[in-house]
Image (cartoon, rainbow, N blue to C red):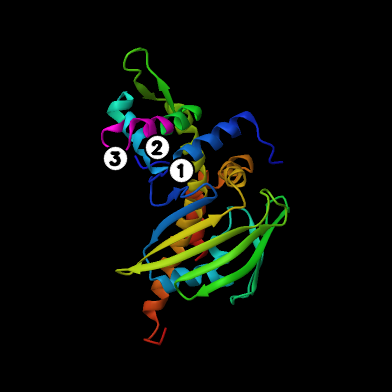
Amino acid sequence: MKGATRNVGKLQVTTPSDREIAMIRVFDAPRSMVFDAWTKPELLKQWLVRSGWTFPVCEIDLRVGGKYRWVWRSPAGKDMGMGGVYREIVRPERIVATEKFDDPWYEGEAVDTMTFVEKGGKTTLTTTVLYASREVRDSVLKSPMEKGIAENYDNLDKVLASTRKAI
Amino acid sequence: MLATTAPDRTLNATFAALADPTRRAILARLASGEASVAELAKPFSMSQPAISKHLKVLERAGLVSRGQDAQRRPRRLEATPLADATEWLERYRRFWEGHYQRLDALLVVMKTKHKKRPRTKR
């Protein structure tokens, strides 16, 4: 056992400190591709979206001080938007950016740090999100269920099948 | 919206208790059976009072309780709060794993396209 670490499947989620959530995931691709999939709107729009939702706004101004703005639309037509400012960009190694949701489900602004480490053609992506306080961090950990976001996973097979068809 | 309810407080205490490596090691030891403070202190280069301090935090979080034996006062693992905390992490993990599996599929396509293309500078 390693504390609050879960290592089921490929993705590891940990709480390295009181205010952080960290995710570690290995992708079978060079880091330049994983980096592109996170930073090029035409690529990001293909995967960072839930089943049945659309991703009508996906703007990325990839430079230090540049902004990003993402808006998803639910099947019922309700929008969920978020955005932030890039603080550091080292292509294809590292991104630091702020994040804030339009309809805030946690207090304040969070800071995301993403590192892309390549070894033998595989990329380890570590994403660390730093929240304003421990209470905020804990509320985020609980929110997927409250917001019904986890429902996404239940339809995963369907999602993957339709993604393959769409390609 | 972020008002702290009773189960929230428990979860906060659980995560705070788990943030320390010594406390995680104590829980790992207790997972294999109850143990006295002296037994718990042995593998660590720490005094019994220092271990007792960590045990107090774990007890407050409801992760550890005291056994019946009045002499040894063995500590034992209470699994429920730990299961609650890992369940939240598991839900969060599942949400992202769903997205990342789609990204996997996209990366396969990107690699195929990259191979098909004549060699160009990246």
The answer to whether tags 2 and 3 share a subunit is yes
Q: Is residue A147 left or right of residue B122?
A: right
Discs 2 and 1 carry the same chain letter:
yes
Q: Mark 1 highlights which residue? A: B19
Q: Mark on residue B45?
A: 3
Q: Which mark is residue B23?
A: 2
* Magenta span of residues: B41-53
The residue under the point 58% across, 66% down is A97
Q: Nearer the viewer, mark 1 or mark 3?
A: 3
Residue B32 visible in the shown view:
no
Of residues A107 and B84, the one nearer the viewer is A107
Q: CA distance from mark 2 to mark 1?
A: 8 Å
- SS assignment at label 1: loop
Q: Looking at the image, is B102 positioned above or below residue B54? A: below
Q: Work out how far the residue at label 1 is from the one at label 3, CA to CA, in angstroms.
A: 19 Å
Point out the tag, 2 or 3, that comes first from the N-terminus: 2
Q: Are marks 1 and 3 on the same chain?
A: yes
